[in-house]
Image: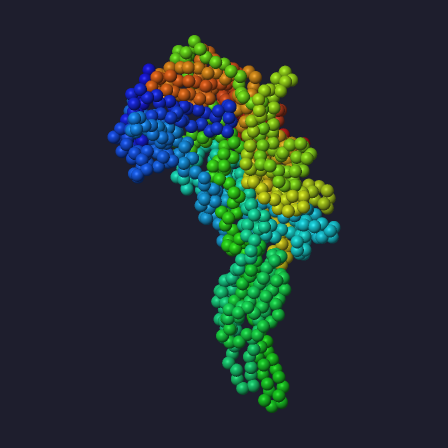
């Protein structure tokens, strides 16, 4: 049977050959290639170089006309019986000539997913607009303490230089023990020990919520991202803002200048204090009375390298290079304009204190004795310096090098996500199990040619390896040395009757790090301190240039406080964010976990196993891999002649029944000239369908416990509390117990 297919390009119906075969393929994630996201596409087909088509393509084969750019995808709509069937794009791939004259255009149709690819192109994350998130004059001490979960940028405990230790009673332990490039971050006293005790501004590394990246993509590309990509455990994943230059936070290596522009204080009535300058005014002299002025200044900061400068009428007068140390005095006269600035390549807050002294000297005309009176005025100001020279913490300069397409690929592979793109560029995203769960069932037995069909082995690979970027940091290397694998990695290498399966290992590889996290031991009592840190350094304490790093965070309230050095004294920080291996809904909790930032099974930062079963593979990939590798699965190839309603209605997540056998769709390739459809399916047993059906799950532990399910309504993973014998529903019967520590 021939299907009445009409092709509209840029709203114009194109002329077609009456005998030209147009073949369009629908496919879901290929079980031969677990990276592929589905989209519809066609084989190359030809349309005539008719007057209408030439007008549409503007004689693309000619170089002397303003022809259609053959590199550009052109909006197209396919219709069946005049009703819209598929929207997408076409590409012009060439022109065929006969007898020296243009005869036909070769074109190919792609589904809407290519519209997204076309929009994104080779854009980097830095091409997205994050300017609304920039922080002007950042107070890093306050930002470190902020605990608002919705904050776009957080500053968690991440060590980028040297190493951190915790000692709650001996603040200068690192120095007295002769430890180099080591800093005690556990609070015990306000006393400073620069470089050895307490965090400083320059230690801060931002972490950007994935939600903000998705929002920025929506704004730039005019798309709407919905579904699984908007689950809280996806949106609350954070991208570490580590620039690939390891010298400073923003990658700058040279000093930048910052003017003090918020001067305040009191001065004598003859002088004028403006936000940016002091204009000196001295009282007019009288017989036997003289007035003199002088000024000095200091800067208080945690910066270890800076030049503080005081200018008189634009000329450099005094310089300071050490924190909390005054310059010598310099004389000033009426009319002198005093300004201040600081130069540094580091991130720090600089607090200015200037002492302006007016001295009145009076000589007694009778006995020649001298009397003096001195008035001292204090002028204050501050400026925030951010490495890179902006004076603000700007997101874009701190972003790691990563293409937008690579970011999406990371999220899709990490969370086993399938994407559908609607005509309005709404991107509906699903975890694969939920996507199949939402499909329909069609019995197509009567339309399938069973005179000849193929049943083949289920896969072309001997196993799968889930892994991340190559090891760079000391914790990554240390974990690998002890465990003979990278952190977060999982290898699935099945055997059959003791024999290795034929084929190569297919690798699901993220281009980002799966990073281990360390909880510091309190050296005062050898107990865990409760302080989780991420190390970005090697064994020598040198910052490493890493691939992008994604991490979960949790709020820390109470317990061991963190020391923060402001330059004048050290303060105690009892609330802050820490990196976390498992998403626990932003809080410290042994029961609130939903999913880990690792594929396999990992112990927590303190070595317990309450979240050991919350690996990504166990929650989101197990069924996909079962379809690919289980020995009782088979790949089936059929030929069918489907009625038009089924050609239109069958979706890649549907189940097809063929002579009492159940199949999942890998691809359906339909020839609209002949009506023939080639079906590439996965043959599964009736029991296998339970992997994707909504099932009732029941707590039979004998007590109230916590479980992770795949909610059939939202399609998201969820943490639920169930009393003994109570029930819930979950896609595929996913029911993972969280093991509470006794």
Nearer to the camera, 603 or 150: 603
Nearer to the camera, 278 or 458: 458
Res 255 seen here: yes
Give the residue drawn at x 61%, y 67%.
327
Residue 604 coordinates in the image, percent (x, y): 64, 35
Q: Is residue 567 above or below residue 551?
A: below
Residue at the limit of the structure toward the left, as seen here: 51
Residue 665 coordinates in the image, percent (x, y): 45, 20
Quarter of the image where one finds residue 579: top right
Residue at the limit of the structure toward the right, as seen here: 177
Give the residue drawn at x 39%, y 34%.
115
Nearer to the camera, 192 or 406: 406
Q: Is residue 30 above or below residue 237?
A: above
Give the residue drawn at x 41%, y 36%.
118
Residue 210 coordinates in the image, percent (x, y): 50, 40
Quarter of the image where one finds residue 583: top right
Residue 467 coordinates in the image, percent (x, y): 58, 32
Q: Is residue 37 above or below residue 193?
A: above
Give the residue drawn at x 37%, y 15%.
641
Relative placement, left or right, of 285 versus 572 is: left
Relative placement, left or right, of 219 versus 243 is: left
Residue at the limit of the structure toward the bottom, as seen here: 366
Residue at the limit of the structure toward the front, as seen here: 99
């Amino acid at each position: 049977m021939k299907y009445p297919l009409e092709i509209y390009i840029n709203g114009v119906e194109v002329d077609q050959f009456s005998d030209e075969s147009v073949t369009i393929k629908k496919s879901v994630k290929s079980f031969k290639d677990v990276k592929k996201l589905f989209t519809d596409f066609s084989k190359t087909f030809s349309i005539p170089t008719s007057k209408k088509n030439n007008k549409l393509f503007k004689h693309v084969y000619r170089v002397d006309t303003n022809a259609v750019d053959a590199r550009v995808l052109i909006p197209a709509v396919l219709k069946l019986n005049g009703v819209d069937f598929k929207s997408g794009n076409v590409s012009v791939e060439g022109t065929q000539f006969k007898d020296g004259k243009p005869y036909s255009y070769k074109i190919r149709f792609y589904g809407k997913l290519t519209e997204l690819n076309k929009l994104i192109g080779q854009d980097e994350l830095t091409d997205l607009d994050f300017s609304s998130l920039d922080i002007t004059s950042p107070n890093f001490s306050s930002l470190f303490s902020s605990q608002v979960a919705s904050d776009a940028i957080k500053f968690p405990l991440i060590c980028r230089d040297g190493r951190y230790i915790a000692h709650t009673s001996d603040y200068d332990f690192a120095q007295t023990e002769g430890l180099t490039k080591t800093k005690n971050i556990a609070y015990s006293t306000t006393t400073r020990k620069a470089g050895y005790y307490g965090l400083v501004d320059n230690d801060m590394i931002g972490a950007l919520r994935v939600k903000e990246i998705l929002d920025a993509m929506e704004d730039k590309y005019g798309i709407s991202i919905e579904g699984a990509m908007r689950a809280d455990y996806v949106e609350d994943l954070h991208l570490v803002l580590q620039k690939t230059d390891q010298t400073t936070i923003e990658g700058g290596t040279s000093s930048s200048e910052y003017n003090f522009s918020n001067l305040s204080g009191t001065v004598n009535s003859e002088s004028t204090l403006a936000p940016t300058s002091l204009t000196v005014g001295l009282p007019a002299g009288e017989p036997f009375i003289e007035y003199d002025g002088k000024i000095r200044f200091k800067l208080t900061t945690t910066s270890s390298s800076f030049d503080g400068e005081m200018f008189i009428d634009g000329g450099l007068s005094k310089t300071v290079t050490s924190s909390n140390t005054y310059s010598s005095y310099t004389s000033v006269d009426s009319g002198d304009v005093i300004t201040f600035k600081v130069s540094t390549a580091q991130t720090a807050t600089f607090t200015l204190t200037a002492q302006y002294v007016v001295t009145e000297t009076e000589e007694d005309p009778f006995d020649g004795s001298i009397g003096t009176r001195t008035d001292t005025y204090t002028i204050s100001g501050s400026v925030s310096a951010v490495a890179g020279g902006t004076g603000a913490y700007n997101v874009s300069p701190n972003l790691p090098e990563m293409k937008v397409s690579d970011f999406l690929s990371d999220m899709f592979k990490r969370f086993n996500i399938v994407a559908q793109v609607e005509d309005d560029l709404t991107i509906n995203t699903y975890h694969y199990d939920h996507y199949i769960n939402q499909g329909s069932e069609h019995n197509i037995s009567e339309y399938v040619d069973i005179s000849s069909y193929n049943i083949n082995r289920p896969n072309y690979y001997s196993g799968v390896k889930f892994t991340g970027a190559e090891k760079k940091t000391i914790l990554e290397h240390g974990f690998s040395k002890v465990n003979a694998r990278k952190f977060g990695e999982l290898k699935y290498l099945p055997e059959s009757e003791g024999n290795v399966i034929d084929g190569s290992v297919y690798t699901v590889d993220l281009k980002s790090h799966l990073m281990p996290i360390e909880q510091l031991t309190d050296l005062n009592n050898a107990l865990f301190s409760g302080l989780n840190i991420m190390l970005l350094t090697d064994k020598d304490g040198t910052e490493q240039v890493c691939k992008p790093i994604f991490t979960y965070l949790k709020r820390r309230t109470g317990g061991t406080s963190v020391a923060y050095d402001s330059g004048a004294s050290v303060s105690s920080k009892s609330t802050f964010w820490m990196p976390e291996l498992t998403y626990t809904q932003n809080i410290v909790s042994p029961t609130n976990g939903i999913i880990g930032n690792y594929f396999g099974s990992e112990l927590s930062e303190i070595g317990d196993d309450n979240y050991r079963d919350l690996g990504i593979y166990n929650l989101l990939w197990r069924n996909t891999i079962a379809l690919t590798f289980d020995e009782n699965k088979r790949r089936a190839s059929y030929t069918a002649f489907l009625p038009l309603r089924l050609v239109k209605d069958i979706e890649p997540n549907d189940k097809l029944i063929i002579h009492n056998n159940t199949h999942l769709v890998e691809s359906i390739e339909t020839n609209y000239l002949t009506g023939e459809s080639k079906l590439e399916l996965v043959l599964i047993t009736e029991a296998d369908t339970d992997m994707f059906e909504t099932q009732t799950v029941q707590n039979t532990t004998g007590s109230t416990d916590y479980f992770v399910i795949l909610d059939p309504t939202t399609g998201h993973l969820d943490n639920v509390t169930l009393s003994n014998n109570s029930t819930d529903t979950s896609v595929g019967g996913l029911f993972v117990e969280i093991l509470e520590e006794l």
